[in-house]
Image (cartoon, rainbow, N blue to C red):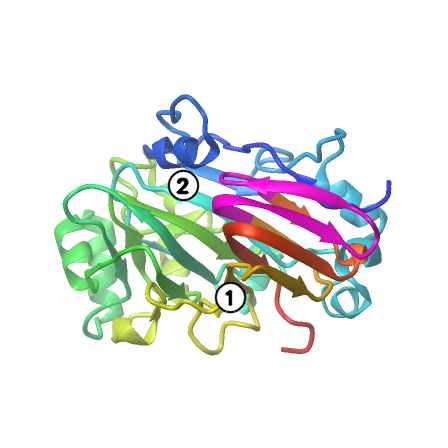
Amino acid sequence: MTASPSKLPANQPPQFYRGGAAIAALRGAGSGKDFGPEDWVASTTPMFGKEETGLSRLPDGPWLRDAVRADPEAWLGAPHVSAFADSTALLVKLLDAGQRLPVHFHPSNSFAQKHFDSHFGKTEAWIVVGTSGDDPRVYPGFRESVNPATVAEWVREQDIGAMLGALNSVPVVPGDNVYIPAGLPHAIGEGVFVVELQQPTDFSLTMEWRDFLGSPEKGHLGIGFDAALQALDTSAHDPESLIKHTGDADESIVDLLVPGTAQFFRADRLRPQPTLALDPSFTVLVALDGHGLLKTERGGELALSKGDTVVLPYGVGQTEISGELTLIRCRPPAAGA
């Protein structure tokens, strides 16, 4: 099939935590699913242990994964294929935390290769696009360095108060953007709605498994906590080194993430004033509000409005976006970054 820009429907694989109302509101749906808190956008990544659950379908039927594999240069561009083969090197989600998520962390590339036979670990970033409730906040990293033996005891005893109390606790508003490198312990609080960028895996090592996952095996993904905790960053982190505040920025293109993230992914907020020209790239667009039009160098055209999620192949060439709208543009790592 010819690679072309496509609007993608909601893709909400079942999860273990509540949420979804903010996703439904963004997309103009009737109501959120009780356990539909994640919408996997332009996903070529299945859920851990699954063959197809989590993958995105294109409007004409095939899995996006299969379409990319059939013609990777058209979808991704030759420089990207040289660096990452036929992987998009990106997973984008809409994530609506209807309750606080458990304390967890993700493996690095090297740890994932050793234990999960994967070239990618799971570094991620959260672009806060909405909040609700009295106290929306996130929990990125430990406030002070913690002895690994102490953490192992917390996990063994499921001492949730100690785990959560040791983390930074940071209130957030729309326009805040949080970088979560591999190994960093973290949680997202109730009422936080994000566009999440991550490496294209589903490896979550969950310290706080009780009341969420039902068994410790699901927390350590079958490798045991002794091995899993080797991937945990137990050092202290200043949360402000992980967060970029962009709520007051009014440029037409705003780089949303802290320096150093381009080796994993790139994210911008776009507001055409009145038009924007974008260079070719595999891109995922999330329309937060307004209406506009997308035109490509190869002749493709899409009307855009609030709630649309669009996958844009490299092969469509330069893209022009016009109208009164706000978009989040998500892209894979820059080849060679």
- In the rendered image, residue 249 lying in the magenta stretch gets the answer no
Q: Between residues 255 and 159, which one lies in front from this camera angle?
A: 255
Residue most extreme to the front: 274
Name the amino acid type tagged 1. Ser
Quadrant of the image occupied by residue 132: top left
| 79 lies left or right of 269 | right
Quadrant of the image occupied by residue 242: bottom left
Q: Between residues 106 and 295, which one lies in front from this camera angle?
A: 295
Label 1 and label 2: CA atoms lie apart by: 43 Å
Q: Residue at x 78, y 64 (%)?
A: 81
Q: Residue 218 carries which label?
A: 2
Query: Compared to 147, does 226 lie above or below?
Result: above
Q: Mark 1 points at which residue?
A: 252
| 336 lies left or right of 172 | right
Q: Which residue is drawn at 51% across and 63% down?
A: 268
Query: Compared to 15, does 114 lie above or below?
Result: below
Expressed as whole percent of the image width and height from the top left, the position of residue 46 reads 60, 41
| 230 lies left or right of 44 | left
Q: Is residue 229 visible?
A: yes
Give the extent of the magenta segment: 286-309
| 64 lies left or right of 157 | right
Q: Is mark 1 on a helix, strand or loop?
A: loop
Q: Which residue is drawn at 51% across and 66% down?
A: 252
| Magenta stretch, main secondary structure class | strand
Q: Is mark 2 on a helix, strand or loop?
A: helix
Quadrant of the image occupied by residue 308: top right
* Mark closest to the chain's N terminus, 1 or 2: 2
Q: Between residues 285 and 199, which one lies in front from this camera angle?
A: 285
Name the amino acid type tagged 2. Lys
